[in-house]
Image (cartoon, rainbow, N blue to C red):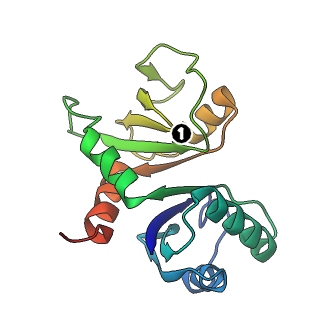
Amino acid sequence: MARFVVFLRAINVGGHTVAKAKLQEAFICLGYQNVSTFKQSGNVILETDEPDPAEIKRNVEKTLRNLLGYDVAVFVRTIPQLKAIVNLEPFKGYDREGASFLVTFLENAPSEFPHTLPLIIPKSTAQIISVKGNEVFNVTHGGGEGGLPNPFLESKLKLKATTRNMNTIAQIVEKFSEKD
């Protein structure tokens, strides 16, 4: 049985409130096992015999659309994929004082990134520093600017996106990695 992390965009923000218990029940009804949320209900960890992340994505999107009455963007990653992101150390060398280090998950890898990096998102301190596959690495110094990469990247790349703090990704890896 494989373990996956499902990141949901815009759950429990912007007026879209969903109780963790209701969300977990929806995932359990899909046949997923050991379902739990982490920190916020937009981070769902599950186990399944389904090996295809795209199939998990389709099933979750359809179920949440029926349950909530609106579309929820869904991003599925394995624990090894998240571990590889953490091990990249994409923020090595950046000043940590007052900084937030973020990873934005894209629905697909962009065919190209139309800007030179690093790139400061207009009217903010949020800075895109790297794009690797379907992840974008961001640094902010303004506090509360963690949501800025989503709309900017979605408009520029025409891809759905959701952003998480790198600390959250590292904590998920630590808590849900198989112990050797």
Looking at the image, residue 9 lies above or below residue 115? below
Q: In which quarter of the image is the C terminus?
A: bottom left
What residue sits 45% from the left and 20% below the top? 119
Res 10 → quadrant: bottom right
Q: Can residue 174 be seen in this view?
A: yes
Circle 1: residue type: Leu
Q: In which quarter of the image is the N terminus?
A: bottom left
Tag count in the figure? 1
| Residue 144 in the image, given as x and y percentages of width and height | 44, 47
Give the SS element for disc 1. loop
| Residue 43 in the image, given as x and y percentages of width and height | 49, 66
Horizontal side of 76 relative to 158 (left or right) equals left
Looking at the image, residue 172 lies above or below residue 94? below
The residue that label 1 is drawn on is: 148
| Residue 44 in the image, given as x and y percentages of width and height | 50, 70
| Residue 56 in the image, given as x and y percentages of width and height | 62, 65
Q: Nearer the viewer, residue 36 or 95?
A: 36
Horizontal side of 145 relative to 28 (left or right) equals left
Res 113 → quadrant: top right
What residue sits 76% from the left and 67% below the top? 62
Q: Can residue 9 be seen in this view?
A: no
What residue sits 71% from the left and 61% below the top? 58
